[in-house]
Image (spheres, helix red, strand yellow):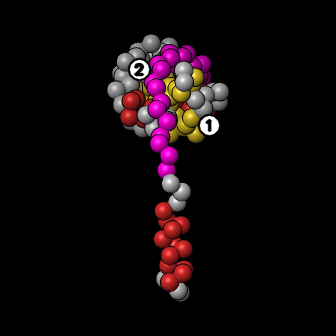
Amino acid sequence: MRPKSLAALVALLVAGLGTPSRAAPSYVAETVVYKIETRAGTLNAEVVHATLNGKIVKAPAIMTMSPYSALGRNGDADRWVAKGYHRVWVDVPGTGDSGGCYDYGADGEKKAGYDSVEWVADQKWSTGKVAMIG
């Protein structure tokens, strides 16, 4: 886009700067273990919550499903929690502390993944936005 005047150019530059940023809140991590009821069994989930002033904040979540036992696997949680996200790790069916039958990539695991995302999105601490990595 080519501005038609110097005033238009200045307006574009100022708009690009946005509002001055405030200091980011200092989120503190708090880990809670949950059980998620899915169509493939009860799954174990470890959630590292972003908290402010001792209270869990309403925030988006980043979730990973893994067959490698969720407990203690939130090594990257500090990176995400510091930015105001909840970090969620879920043991896939039949692994770690999850119930059900391990069936890598099959229908049970797919349904459990869907159910887990829906569960996270529906929690009072969630904004309903859930991303998956891993």
Asked if residue 2 shows in the view, the reply is yes
Quickly name the residue at label 2.
Answer: 70
Q: Characterize the local packing of mark 1: few (<14), some (14-19) or many (20 or more) Cα atoms within 10 angstroms.
A: some
The image position of residue 77, as x and y in percent, is 40, 29
Quickly name the residue at label 1.
Answer: 128
Residue appearing at x 47%, y 42% in the figure? 23
Secondary structure beneath disc 2? loop
Residue appearing at x 50%, y 28% in the figure? 50
Compared to residue 17, the image places residue 100 above or below, namely above
Amino acid type indicated by mark 2: Ala
Q: Which residues are magenta?
A: 21-46
Viewer-proximal residue among 85 and 119: 85
Is residue 15 toward the left or the right of residue 127 in the image? left
Is residue 73 toward the left or the right of residue 25 in the image? left
Amino acid type indicated by mark 1: Gly
Residue appearing at x 52%, y 60% in the figure? 18
Q: Quadrant of the C terminus?
A: top left
- Whether 29 is among the magenta residues is yes
Residue appearing at x 52%, y 73% in the figure? 12
Asked if residue 101 shows in the view, the reply is no
The mark closer to the camera, 1 or 2, is 1
The image position of residue 99, as x and y in percent, is 50, 13
- Whether 12 is among the magenta residues is no
Q: Which mark is residue 85?
A: none
Compared to residue 132, the image places residue 22 above or below, namely below
